[in-house]
Amino acid sequence: MKTLLVNAMLAAAVVASATTSLGAADGRLKDAATVLTEMAASSDTGIPLSLMAKAKCVVVIPGVKKAALGVGGQYGRGYLVCRNATGWSAPAGVRLEGGSVGVQIGGTDTDVLLIVLNDRGVDRLLASKFTIGADAAVAAGPVGRQASAQTDATMMAEMLAWSHSRGAYVGISLQGSTLREDTSENKELYGSEMTSKAIVKGTHPAPPGAADLMAALAKY
C-alpha cells in the first residue's frame, strides 16, 4: 500500500510539473487550431470529414500530458466549441484529467480530439463535470477511409475520440477520464469566470487569439 501511495504521489508530481509548462491561452488556441487542421486534413489517415460535418460540438485538447510510475495520470487543457445558428460558437475552456494503474514508466504528449454526435452528448459536455465511460458513452473514432465500415458500430456513442501522437492518428478510449469546464481559462479569454454553457449557448464573439481555430472549424 505504501509503495502504491508513493508511486501515485510521484506520478501526480510529474503531471503537475508538466502543467506549469503550458503556454498562455493564445498559445493553446493556436495549438488547438493546428491539431484540428492536421487531424482533419489527413483524409486517408485522419478524422473522416463526414463525421466532422455531423458534429454538434468539437473538443480539441492539444498536448495532453501523460506520465506513469506504477500509477499513471494525464492532464490537458483545451477548448470546446458547438454549432449555433450562425456557424460555430466562441471557444470555452475545458480540462481533461484522469488516471490509470499500470506499469509503464515514462511520459508522452498526445493531442486529443472529441466529436459530439447527439444532444445527449451535448448535455453531458455542458455539465460542469462528467466522467467518460460512467456518465457518457465515448467510443474510439474511425480513421480515414475505414470510416464507412466502422461508423455504424460507433454511432451509438455520444462522442467519438481520436488521438495524434508521434505521427499516428488513432481512435482512443478515454474511459475513466474526467472532462470539466475550465473557468480560469474562460476568465483569461473573456474577463470573467464564465461557464462553458454560457459561452457556447450565448452570443459572445470569439477572442482574437481564436481566429485560426475558428477558420479551421469553418473549413473542416
Image (cartoon, rainbow, N blue to C red):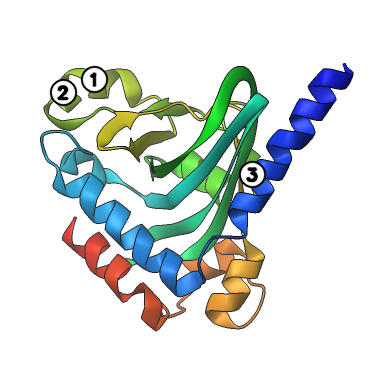
> Element type at marker 3?
helix
Disc 3 to disc 2, C-alpha distance:
34 Å
Q: Is residue 188 above or below residue 149?
A: below
| Relative to 46, 129 lies left or right | right
Q: Residue at x 78, y 35 (%)?
A: 9
Residue 47 found in image quarter: top left
Marks 3 and 2, the one that precedes in the sequence: 3
* Image disc number at residue 15: 3
Give the image location of residue 138, x and y in percent. 46, 30
Question: Which mark identifies residue 146?
Answer: 2
Judge the density around disc 2: few (<14), some (14-19), many (≥20) Cα neighbours within 10 Å: few
Q: Where's residue 89, x and y in %?
A: 39, 67
Instruction: Report the residue marked by disc 1.
Output: 150
Q: CA distance from mark 2 to mark 1?
A: 7 Å
User: Which mark is nearer the camera, 3 or 1?
Assistant: 3
Quarter occupied by the C terminus: bottom left
Residue 217: image location, x then y, percent = 26, 61
Element at label 1 = helix
